[in-house]
Each structure stands twice: as structure tokens, then as C-alpha cells.
Amino acid sequence: MKSILKLFILIISLNVSSLYASKVDTVLTYSPSMKKSIKAVVITPDTYTKTEKMPVLYLLHGYSGKYDNWTLHMPNINYLADQYQFIVVCPDGNYGSWYFDSPIDSTFRYETYVAGELIQWVDKNYKTIKNRSGRAISGLSMGGHGALYLAFRHQDVFGACGSMSGGVDIRPFPNNWDLSKRLGEQRSCPQNWENNTVINQLHLLTPKSLNIIFDCGTEDFFYPVNVRLHEELTYRNIPHDFISRPGQHNREYWNNAVKYQAQFFSDFFKSSEKI
């Protein structure tokens, strides 16, 4: 009886795995501004070779992470690429770049890289929709900050953006996560902190200029700043989806959150096709 049960489980597992045929590649991109090569993971869905152009979701990792964190720790994303038929690109953010161009360290130019150089490389090497209607960007924690920061500042590049447990206001955390190494000490370089926090980029937005989704668990240390971002966007009449539910700053939460965001971005891509 046990052997029959094991065989049944094996057959089910094989059938389920065959549903997801996405291809995961590690690629080497180049940043002219930083004069170095940077790794990224590119996930292409099962029908990639059968289509002409596909939309792209850029996913950013968190602090202390690297390019392969999404595929290693949150394999949901491999399946979602097949389910929703988009390419996923996960670039390396160099441990603690926060995805902006550091005003004090010219070797950290990750806004220039992700919003410009990486986009150009991906569009050149893959069959992509080469405009904002086919691009979305999201990320977790530091990557959540980076995704909103880059999308708000580069609305000509990205049509939709998201954040999961994002550090959407870095100012309350002056002693954390290498931020002072990228911006200088807050007490001596306050303007650097003001200029490079997500919540201070809202003046760049107009109603419906971007499709925006972000979420945060109620037990997360970033929860208060996410609530404040939601309130500020609401005050400015900027449409957005804000999801608040029980959860902490961990992989269990992000594995669940990315499923909601993938659906959101898929809907955006499909609506863009009709325009």
C-alpha cells in the first residue's frame, strides 16, 4: 500500500512540475557608469521561443541579498513567470546599494544601472516589449524602496511598480543597513537623505501616471512608513493598491505577497495590450 501511495505522489509531482517549464539563466550584464560587470537572473516562461515580444517584471532583492535570492529562496516566482507569461529579471544590487546613485560614492550608481543600462541590455538580448507598457518593477525591503524610487523617477521607463515590506521612508533609520555609507551621516548630510527617500518623490506623480501596488505586514518594522505612504498618496489623489495584513519581515510573507503582485502586473500588461 505504501509503495502504491509513493508512486501516486511521484506521478502527481511529475505532472505538476511539467506544468512549469520556465528557464532560469544567470547572465552577465555590464554597467558603463560603474565600469564593471554585474550578474542577474533572467527567467523566461515556457512559451518564450514561440512568441515575438514579452513584458518584463524586474524584481529587486533586499539588503544583504544578491541577484539569485528570488529563485533560491522564493521559487514561486519561477512558476509565476509561466502562469502569467512574462519575463522576470533579478539584478544584483550589491549588498546595500538601495538602488540610487550615491551622492558620496561614485562606485554606487544603481539608479543609472537598473533604470537605464540594465533595461537596455535586456531589451537588446531578449524579445521584450521595449516601452513602459511592457515593464514593471517591484522588490522586497531595500528592493521595495528601490522599485518605487526608480519607477517614480523614471515613469518613461516603467508603467507599473510595487513594493513588498519596503523601506519607503529611510529617514527614521539613520544607523541601519549601510545607509550612511551611501548618503553620509544624516546629521551632517541631511539633504542627501531627503532627496533619496521614496516618500519625498511623490511630487513627481500625477493621478494614473503609474500603476502602483505595495504591501506590508502589520508586525513589520517598516509597517508605519508604509501606512504613511498610503496616506500621502491618498491625500494627493494618486490611485494605488495598498495591502495590509498580518505578517512579519520574512520570506514567508514575501512568498505570499509576490503572488498578489504578479496578478496585479499581469493585469497591467494585459490592459496595456488593448491600448
Image (tube, rainbow, N blue to C red):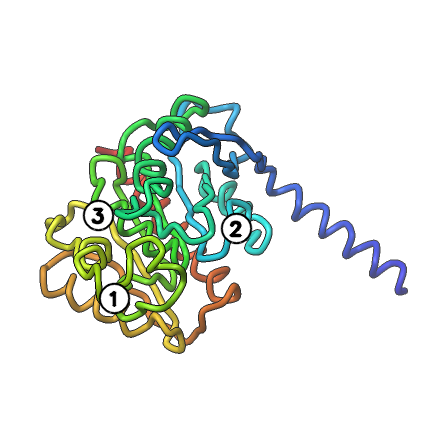
The quadrant in which the N terminus is found is bottom right
Q: Residue 84: x, y in percent? A: 45, 42
Give the spatial CA distance, label 3 vs label 1: 18 Å
In the rendered structure, which amino acid carries the disc numbered 1?
A: Arg
Q: What's the residue at 54%, 32% (across, down)?
A: 27
Mark nearer the N terminus (1 vs 2): 2
- Secondary structure beneath dot 1 equals loop
Q: Residues within 10 Å of mark 2 (few under 14, many from 20)?
A: many
Mark nearer the N terminus (3 vs 1): 3
In the rendered structure, which amino acid carries the disc numbered 2?
A: Trp
Q: Residue 128: x, y in percent? A: 39, 27
The quadrant in which the C terminus is found is top left
- Secondary structure beneath dot 3 equals helix
Residue sitting farthest toward the front? 188
Q: In which quarter of the image is residue 171?
A: bottom left
Q: Name the residue under label 2.
A: 70
Give yes or no for contact between labels 1 and 2 (Cβ–Cβ under 8 Å): no
Give the spatial CA distance, label 1 vs label 2: 27 Å
Q: Residue 68: x, y in percent? A: 55, 46
Q: What's the residue at 40%, 41% (across, down)?
A: 57
Q: Residues within 10 Å of mark 3 (few under 14, many from 20)?
A: many
Mark closer to the observer (3, 1)? 1
**Numbered tag placed on residue 103 in the rendering:** none
Q: Mark 3 points at which residue?
A: 152
| Figure check: 40 above or below 260 | above
Give the spatial CA distance, label 3 vs label 2: 23 Å
In the rendered structure, which amino acid carries the disc numbered 3?
A: Phe
- Secondary structure beneath dot 2 equals helix
**Numbered tag placed on residue 171 in the rendering:** 1
Give yes or no for contact between labels 3 and 1 (Cβ–Cβ under 8 Å): no
| Figure check: 136 above or below 171 | above
